[in-house]
């Protein structure tokens, strides 16, 4: 290494060498004719850079500090019952047959439901797809036979929701099956118009959670006001709804 004479090197945070305070970035410095961030007399100082990102330009700047949120009017867990009575003829079962077993398999992915809100109530109407397998023994026979029917069971329910209004929104969680029931021998009106007990009642109990929400405006002080303050005004004509077919 070349002898630097009386100039004693000083270590810096840059890993560079300053030779003395008076000639920190002079002719004897490796930073000749440059102006780095470090200042003479402080070879251990670090750069203090102030980087500023360009201001973000919004196409449509906000002009309000209020926010729109969904306020929960109410939430409750409810049960709905889907049921129907099927005559033996629906399963091609001879009259007077002995019913040995009934298996009902619901298809939760095949549920059709239509939900609407009237004053203080949520009305729900729908259908659930099912496959019903009936094992029976025909009169005069000893060999059981199983016939299957794919159909739908209707359900309807109205749930009390004090404070709910027609313009509110309703959310229902996916249905959960709580129970499946089948009862052979229930009375039904046959094709001849006479009451017969050659029928099977099928019932499914479903559970869901209904949540009613309402859009409101919240200001910066926490004040809340309804988007539509007249949404709950009563009308003289009761609402009538024709729901879409499944």
Image (cartoon, grey):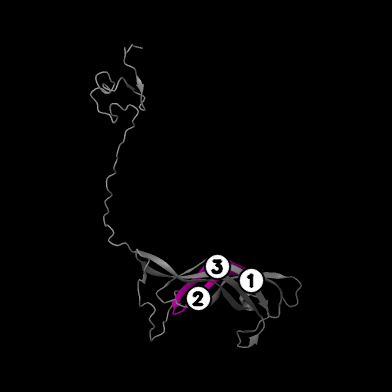
The image quadrant where one finds the N terminus is: top left
Q: Residue furthest left?
A: 33
Foreground: 27 or 109? 27
Label disc, if present, on residue 13 of the rendered structure: none
Q: Residues within 10 Å of mark 2 (few under 14, many from 20)?
A: some
- Of residues 233 and 42, the one nearer the viewer is 42
* Residue 191 placement, left or right of 138: left
Disc 3 designates what residue? 175
Q: CA distance from mark 2 to mark 3?
A: 13 Å
Compared across the picture, whether 24 is left or right of 87 comes to left
Judging by the rendered image, the residue that carries numbered circle 1 is 180
Secondary structure of residue under mark 3 = loop
Tally the marks: 3
**Front-lying residue, 205 or 203:** 205
Secondary structure found at label 2? strand
Q: Residue at x 24, y 21 (%)?
A: 26
Local crowd at mark 3 within 10 Å, few (<14), some, or many (≥20)? some
On the image, the x and y values in percent for residue 98 come to 72, 76
> What residue is pinned by disc 2?
125
Indicate whether residue 118 is drawn in magenta. yes
Residue 218 drawn above or below residue 26: below
Looking at marks 1 and 2 on the same chain, the residue that comes earlier in the sequence is marked by 2
């Amino acid at each position: 290494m070349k002898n630097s004479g009386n100039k004693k090197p000083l270590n810096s945070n840059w890993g560079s060498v300053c030779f003395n305070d008076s000639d920190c970035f002079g002719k004897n410095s490796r930073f000749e004719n440059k102006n780095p961030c470090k200042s003479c007399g402080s070879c251990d100082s670090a750069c203090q850079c102030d980087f500023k990102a360009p201001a973000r330009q919004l196409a449509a700047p906000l002009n309000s500090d209020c926010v729109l949120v969904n306020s929960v009017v109410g939430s409750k867990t409810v049960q709905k019952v889907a049921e129907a009575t099927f005559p033996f003829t629906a399963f091609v079962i001879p009259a007077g047959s002995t019913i040995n077993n009934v298996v009902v398999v619901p298809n939760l992915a095949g549920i059709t439901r239509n939900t609407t809100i009237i004053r203080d109530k949520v009305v729900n109407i729908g259908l659930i797809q099912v496959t019903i397998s009936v094992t029976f023994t025909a009169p005069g026979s000893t060999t059981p036979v199983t016939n299957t029917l794919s159909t739908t069971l209707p359900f309807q329910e109205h749930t009390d929701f004090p404070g709910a209004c027609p313009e509110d929104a309703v959310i229902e969680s996916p249905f959960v099956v709580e129970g499946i029931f089948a009862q052979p021998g229930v009375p039904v009106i046959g094709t001849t118009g006479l009451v017969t007990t050659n029928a099977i009642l099928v019932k499914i109990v479903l559970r869901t959670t209904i949540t009613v929400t309402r859009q409101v405006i919240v200001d910066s002080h926490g004040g809340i006001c309804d988007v539509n303050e007249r949404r709950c005004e009563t009308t003289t004509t009761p609402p009538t709804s024709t729901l879409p077919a499944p």
